[in-house]
């Protein structure tokens, strides 16, 4: 008969074996990494099947604040959004094996004859999507204000003494700001995603059982996946019981739950 410590050790080994099996199964389902315009495809993202978090507006605002302070780390692998999709819907090889490719990641493309009701099943990322929508609205408003200012300057008459100063401000300050904001509005719509083939038997299995996605890390749970800044924001907001639930979800899914 095994002693209590031996039983604990045996259970730990069994758990690691099970985790290893699930990781290997997940890798079989993994197609690759890509970038996706999540605003353009917002209506195609189905949330809630693998991640039960409902939208919490306070969390959305915290993410929005983080975007302002820490920028939008759209291509950081730790912030990727896991998507499950029918592989046959993807055009060619619109993905990469390199999740560190950043802006060089290929753009997800869907075949032209896809069914009208096709969708990505998203395991997390709903709060990021909502925060990004608000972020883009704010950047677009700032861009509109700068463009109105440019239009006003171009339409007004100025005397010779002010002409040089106005021209310098217009060409060296205002117009570069406008171009920068235009680039942000366009670029910040994309986000790094991992694509999983929902046709693989493993995907059907995970709807009933916890699972692990590829690069799981067993170190500090609260630093498993997301930006440390975000962890500092969310840690105090989780109740003791909920923290246990969310941390368990992170360990099993290895995803940022927001």
Image (cartoon, rainbow, N blue to C red):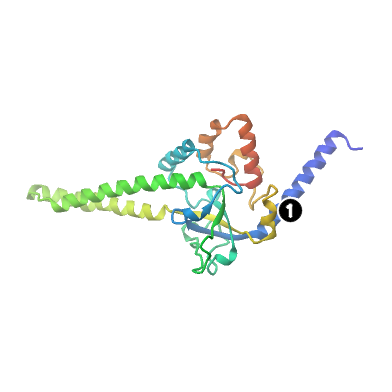
Residue denoted by label 1? 21
Q: Looking at this view, is 129 or 163 the one in front?
A: 129
| Residue displayed at 57% across by 47% down | 48
- x and y percent of residue 102 in the render? 49, 56
Outermost residue on the right side: it is 1
Residue occupying image coordinates x 43% and y 43%: 67
Q: What residue is shown at x 61% (from left), y 38% (from top)?
A: 246
Question: Percent position (x, y) of residue 182?
Answer: 33, 54
User: Within 10 Å of the Cα at label 1, are there few (<14), some (14-19), or many (20+) other Cα atoms?
Assistant: some
- Left or right: 5, with 72 as reference point: right
Question: Circle 1 — which element?
Answer: helix
Q: Relative to the observer, which residue lies in front, 216 or 120?
A: 120
Residue 110: give x, y in percent of width and height: 51, 65
Question: Image quadrant for the N terminus?
Answer: top right
Q: In terms of depth relative to the viewer, which is nearer, 257 or 116?
A: 116
253, above or below 113, in the image: above
């Amino acid at each position: 008969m095994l002693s209590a410590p031996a039983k604990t050790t045996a259970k730990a080994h069994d758990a690691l074996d099970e985790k290893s099996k699930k990781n290997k199964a997940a890798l079989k389902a993994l197609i690759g990494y890509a970038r996706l315009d999540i605003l353009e495809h917002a209506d195609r993202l189905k949330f809630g099947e693998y991640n039960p978090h409902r939208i919490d507006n306070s969390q959305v605002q915290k993410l929005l604040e983080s975007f302002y302070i820490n920028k939008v780390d759209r291509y950081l692998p730790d912030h990727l959004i896991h998507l499950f999709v029918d592989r046959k819907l993807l055009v060619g090889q619109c993905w990469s094996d390199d999740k560190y490719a950043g802006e060089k990641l290929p753009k997800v493309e869907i075949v032209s004859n896809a069914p009208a009701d096709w969708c990505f099943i998203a395991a997390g990322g709903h709060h990021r999507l909502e925060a990004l929508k608000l972020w883009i609205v704010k950047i677009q408003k700032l861009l509109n204000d700068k463009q109105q200012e440019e239009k006003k300057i171009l339409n007004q008459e100025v005397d010779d003494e002010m002409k040089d100063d106005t021209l310098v401000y217009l060409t060296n300050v205002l117009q570069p700001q406008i171009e920068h904001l235009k680039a942000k509005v366009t670029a910040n719509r994309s986000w790094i995603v991992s694509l999983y083939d929902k046709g693989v038997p493993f995907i059907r299995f995970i709807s009933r059982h916890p699972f692990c996605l590829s690069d799981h890390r067993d170190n500090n749970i609260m630093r498993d996946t997301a930006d440390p800044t975000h962890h500092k924001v969310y840690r105090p907001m989780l109740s003791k019981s909920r923290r246990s639930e969310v941390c368990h979800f992170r360990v099993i899914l290895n995803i940022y739950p927001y």
